[in-house]
Image: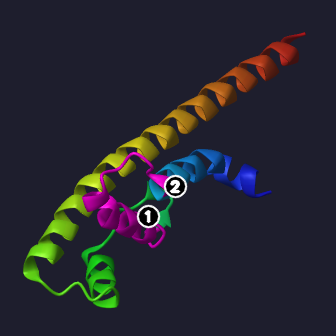
Amino acid sequence: MQAKLRKRRGLPPLETREELQEEIETADDLPAHLLWIWQAFAILSRTRVVNQTGPQPITLQELDAYCSLEQITTEWERRELINLITVLDIEWLKVSHAAINKSREDAKKQAEKDAKNRTRKGRR
């Protein structure tokens, strides 16, 4: 049921997002000084809103709440977090929206193909 609903909404298969999330969380080859940013992104990414157009950007309110929760108080750390999370989020959204668009295009092509086949059967 959930797979049909996701497909109808033009969302990519759940495995794609789970694989991406797993890659975000493991980050084995990431330099140690960036690990805190990567982990913040993994946590914040779960808070994003998803609507009929797909996943939305991580909000500044969520970033602010994360800073408060993790007691990130220095201006430099907050700016660094916001800037780097924003860059990561833009790239994540590009991948996600590309997958959504491909899924929608595939569904449209399949619907056109099915309609063409029904028309042919109706002529016989």
Q: Can residue 10 be seen by looking at this rendering?
A: no
Q: Can you say whether 104 is above or below 87 in the image?
A: above
Q: Nearer the viewer, residue 1 or 32?
A: 32
Amino acid at circle 2: Gln
Q: Can you say whether 116 is above or below 96 in the image?
A: above
Give the quarter of the figure containing the N terminus: bottom right
Q: Nearer the viewer, residue 27 or 86?
A: 27
Question: Mark number for residue 13?
Answer: none
Residue 119: percent from the left, percent from the top? 78, 19
Q: Nearer the viewer, residue 19 or 55?
A: 19
Q: Which contiguous range is marked in magenta?
A: 26-49
Q: Can you say whether 7 is above or below 74 in the image?
A: above
Q: Can residue 122 be seen by looking at this rendering?
A: yes
Look at the numbered disc 2 and give the secondary structure of its residue: helix
Magenta-colored stretch includes residue 6: no
Look at the numbered disc 1 and give the secondary structure of its residue: helix
Choose the circle earlier in sequence order: 1 or 2.
2
Residue shown at the point (20%, 68%) measured from the top left: 82
Magenta-colored stretch includes residue 46: yes
Residue 29: percent from the left, percent from the top? 39, 45
Q: Residue furthest front?
A: 32
Q: Residue furthest left?
A: 75
The reply to whether the C-beta atoms of the residues labelled 1 and 2 are less than 8 Å apart is yes
Question: Mark number for residue 42?
Answer: 1
Q: Residue furthest right?
A: 124
Residue shown at the point (32%, 56%) measured from the top left: 89
Question: Mark number for residue 21?
Answer: 2
Mark 1, Cα crowd under 10 Å, few <14 / some 14-19 / many 20+, is some
Amino acid at circle 1: Ala
